[in-house]
Image (tube, rainbow, N blue to C red):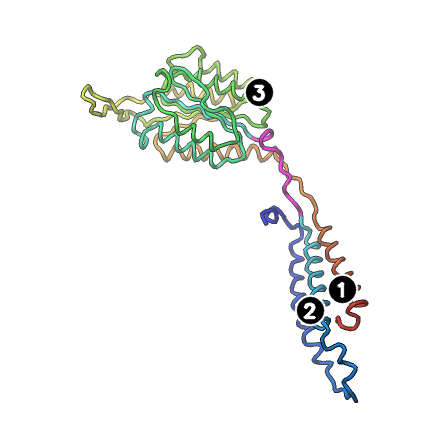
């Protein structure tokens, strides 16, 4: 009955008419008692041929058909409408690419367990909350590449997201290259809204494309970029391995190029956010989620289809069936 959940009623007030059905049943049950009387018969011989008839067993068919007909008529008057015809979100909705920094500094533990793992889990929760959008994944460090192209198969995307780790590519922070790769994945998209979520904890220090140049390219393709700077203020604990294999922690300064990240966001019509711990990063994803839902709601439409006619036809057929039975097979038996 999943289809029934997609039906809305334009005039639900008519459902109050259902109270007539039990009143009809009560009237039917007690009316014969008011019409009871005594009848004297000289012989019962005339009733013997009907003694084994099955017709008396169905003497209540009339009231059943009338109640069902009234129920169908009430549903028809409430005007059921199908709302299944949504705009095709795979081509008309939102395409999102998450561009994530996986450089060595993302192992800092001002986030729990660290910036990279916290960013992965919170992003995965974000993905699970947007089942109708195509989402892709780009990772960057000293260079960048596409970990997962735009897809509606979020199970595959999540598995690939979980597999990313520091050391997959040469270390460094090529913000411009990461952004340019994400733009390349979105430039041919026909979606109404194209979005990049760029997460980094550092300063662009390598790559052949400056971040602002990549932002200008994104703007030309109508791509909006939300930039997120990851890291607490001041210093953060960073794990380092000694020659004996022991892990020691060293306080490292947090250096995020906020002016550049802000410029990228402003150029493309997005916003810049600063995340200092897991909770603020969750709040940022929630904010982006609401911003993009608000934008796409304007472009979506819902086509409703009237569905009262089948219920009206059912009511008519039931009444017609009662009339035919009452005047033929059950003549004199249905009341």
Q: Which residue is mark 3?
A: 188
Q: Are marks 3 and 2 in contact (CB under 8 Å)?
A: no
Helix, strand or loop at disc 2? helix
271 relative to 211, above or below:
below
Q: Quadrant of the C terminus?
A: bottom right
Q: Residue at x 77, y 88 (%)?
A: 40
Nearer-N-terminus badge (1/2)? 2
Q: Is residue 143 left or right of residue 215?
A: left
Looking at the image, the residue that sits furthest to the left is: 244
Report the residue marked by disc 1.
322
Image height of 217 relative to 123, above or below: above
Image spot of residue 99 (x, y percent): 44, 23
Callout 2 crowding tier (Cα within 10 Å): few <14, some 14–19, many ≥20: few
Q: Is residue 80 left or right of residue 246?
A: right
Report the mark closest to the observer, 1 or 3. 1
Location of residue 208 (image quadrant): top left
Name the N-terminal-most of marks 3 and 2: 2
Q: Residue at x 76, y 72 (%)?
A: 333
Q: Name the foreground residue: 104 vs 145.
A: 145
What crowding class fits label 1: few (fewer than 14 Cα within 10 Å), some (14-19), or many (20 or more)? Answer: many
Asked whether 181 falls inside the magenta stretch, the response is no
Q: Quadrant of residue 110?
A: top left
Badge 1 marks a residue whose secondary structure is helix
In the picture, the disc for residue 24 is 2
Residue 158, image x, y percentages: 44, 31
């Amino acid at each position: 009955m999943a289809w029934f959940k997609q039906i809305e009623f334009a005039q639900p007030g008519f459902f109050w008419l259902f109270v007539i059905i039990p009143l009809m049943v009560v009237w039917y049950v007690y009316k014969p008692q008011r019409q009871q009387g005594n009848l004297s018969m000289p012989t019962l011989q005339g009733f013997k041929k009907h003694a084994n008839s099955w017709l008396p067993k169905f003497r209540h068919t009339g009231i059943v058909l009338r109640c069902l007909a009234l129920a169908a008529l009430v549903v028809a008057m409430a005007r059921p409408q199908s709302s299944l015809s949504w705009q095709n979100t795979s081509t008309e909705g939102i395409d999102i690419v998450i561009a994530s920094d996986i450089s060595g500094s993302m192992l800092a533990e001002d986030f729990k367990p660290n910036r990279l793992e916290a960013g992965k889990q919170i992003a995965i929760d974000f993905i699970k909350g947007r089942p109708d959008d195509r989402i892709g994944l780009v990772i960057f460090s000293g260079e960048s590449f596409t970990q997962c192209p735009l897809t509606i198969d979020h199970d595959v995307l999540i598995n690939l997201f979980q597999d990313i780790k520091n050391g997959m590519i040469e270390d460094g922070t090529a913000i411009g290259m990461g952004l340019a790769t994400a733009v390349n994945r979105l430039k041919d998209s026909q979606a109404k809204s194209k979005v990049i979520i760029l997460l980094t904890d550092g300063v662009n220090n390598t790559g052949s494309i400056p971040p602002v140049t990549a932002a200008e390219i994104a703007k030309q393709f109508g791509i909006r970029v939300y930039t997120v700077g990851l890291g607490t203020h001041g210093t953060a604990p960073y794990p380092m391995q000694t020659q004996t294999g022991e892990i020691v922690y060293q306080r490292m300064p947090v250096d995020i190029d906020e002016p550049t990240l802000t410029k990228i966001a402003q150029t493309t019509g997005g916003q810049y956010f600063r995340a200092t711990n897991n909770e603020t990063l969750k709040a940022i994803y929630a904010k982006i989620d609401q911003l993009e839902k608000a934008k796409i709601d304007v472009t979506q439409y819902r086509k409703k289809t009237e569905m009262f006619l089948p219920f009206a036809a059912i009511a008519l057929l039931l009444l017609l069936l009662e009339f035919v039975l009452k005047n033929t097979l059950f003549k004199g038996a249905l009341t």
